[in-house]
Amino acid sequence: MDNQRIAQILEEMADLSEIIGDNTFKIQAYRRAAETIFRLNEPIQEVWARGESIPGIGKGIRTLIEAITPDGESPELVRLRAEVPAELIKLTRIPGIGPKTVGRLWQALGVRTLEEVKQAAKEQKIRAIKGVGAKTEMLLLRGIEKAEMPKERWPLIEALSISEEICARLRDYPEVKRCEVAGSIRRARELVKDIDLVVMTEAAPAVAERLKTFPGNIEVVAWGEEKISFRYASLQPIAVDVRLFSPEQFASGLVHFTGSKEHNVFLRQRAKEKGWKLSEYGLEDERTGEIQTFEQEEALYAALSIPYFTPELRDTEVVGGDAFWKAATAASLEALIKQEDIQGDLHMHTTASDGGDSIEAMARAAKKMGYRYIAVTDHSQSLKVARGLTVEQLLQHMEAIRTVEEKLSNEWGEPFYILRGAEVDILPDGTLDYPDEILERLDLVIASVHTSFKQSNEEMTARILRAARHPFVDIIAHPTGRLIGRREAYGLDVGKLIEQAAVSGVVLELNSYPERLDLSPSYLRLAQEAGVQLAINTDAHHTDGLAWMALGVKIARKALLRPAQVINTWPPEKLFQFLARHRKHWRKR
Ligand SMILES: [Zn+2]
Ligand SMILES: [Zn+2]
């Protein structure tokens, strides 16, 4: 029985004991032992055979381990599993839900099935349990509803976090030199079918062998010495393909398994023109059979005399597709927007409404990203679910923002601008959720729709266009309102909004929150061609969320956006002038 399988069994025993409500010391002992065994460099039996003991693994746990049968069954685990309703165990796969919470549910409400948990959540019985809050109730309800939907495609954000979790564990193996997420996730596709990982190792068979019993691997689908495909236990199982390459083959392997298929065809054609054959193992000279290998992707592209395409540009979603790849030059790619061009983030929330961090924490995190300004844009009064601010609260909030701005600018010895903004709801009739005299006092007004999604196309389009014409609205945020894999866009005629924006000068947002990515590349392209100004924002609700800018920039690159048209690449002076002019322009009318 190998160490990994033993660690897996102990982990599961810890989870089950926690659900049952066993004593904490026992649970912690299981977890510590699992961790220790997972990190051992040799089979645990060999250590014991030498008569050595292992710190953290006492007599009791040793007895449990020695009772595991050769085919990997543990009598103790079987006993524990029988005690806990099988469906409840599934709940621990919902992000944010741990075994302790599941145990509390079970004990307090006696629920045994997902259906019963869902019902209890709907009746708001879960939030009443001691130690469990309304947030957990919401996570449970959403998690169960999600699990009920058949899943052929995964939203990028979910696949990304699962794949990074797997890669992180793989990097713990001494044989693994590198692990990269490849495939459509690396190309920043909105929805992905499976997870592709490319691993650099000089001991492929050993890694493949380990992966057979990788924690979370619930079924091996295909197995070879260079490749293993398995189903990974998430809330719903997701297909994972791991390809193993030697260091010198790594770059060609990574290119191959990043795709897209169409981009690979383009690369192979270029290789052919040079008398070479491109495969995942390198570039083969068709006459001599000699194989050139690469450790860096850039070197492979250079050998083909092709400018280096970052992964998102290899996706078929990139504007122009094949024609774009063929025509691109190093200079044309260099002209596209990059993360380093971004000077600020103009959409974020704080603890004043539904965010998790203070104004100051957000500003400090933004400064770390190299920004020179941000806009704090908490929700407006009618959005009660997001604790929107009343007029009075907003005025206080604006004061608080100014205080932080002064404090940090002094501390840093240079101005750091925090725009006093708001994300103002566009009400069903297209009017805004604060009176004009309040909007006028804000530095930046974002307008967006969060309610009455089911309006007809005509109503919704008229509603948003009305806001886009409002003299004090600077940005229309997440214009289509879609939530990838969860909610369709509402009935907005985006073409009309783009036309309107070109006339009124309102800025359209590319919201980088992974579930939104709104506007999508094809609309961004239309907007750019119509001369509309754009803003790439994160809509961060906590400091970590600011990092989603990188994803937004990738989406913008797929639309071939250039920095000049994206207002948050501008230095502060230019941005403020633009915002002031936008308002003045309207006052004249
Ligand atoms: Zn919003
Ligand atoms: Zn927002």
Image: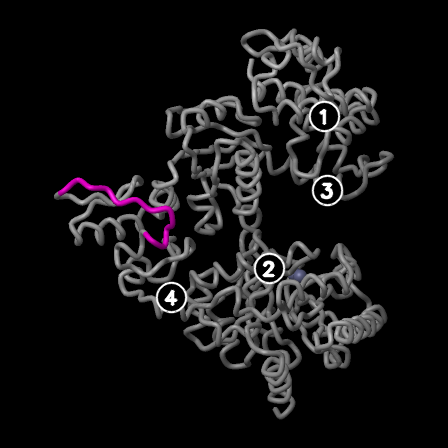
In the image, is residue 307 above or below residue 514? below
Which comes before the other along the chain, label 2 or label 1? 1
What residue do we see at 64% from left, 18% from top? 9
What kind of residue is marked 1?
Arg
Q: Amino acid at mark 2?
A: Gln
Q: Which mark is residue 138?
A: 3
535 lies left or right of 112: left
Residue identified by numbered label 4: 333
Q: Secondary structure at mark 3?
A: helix
Residue 577 higher or lower than 192, as above or below: below
Q: Are marks 2 and 4 in contact (CB under 8 Å)?
A: no
Q: As displayed, is residue 252 above or below residue 309?
A: above
Which kind of residue does numbered mark 3 sit on? Met
Q: Amino acid at mark 4?
A: Leu
Q: Which residue lies under the disc numbered 2?
A: 455
User: Which residue is identified by label 1?
Assistant: 32
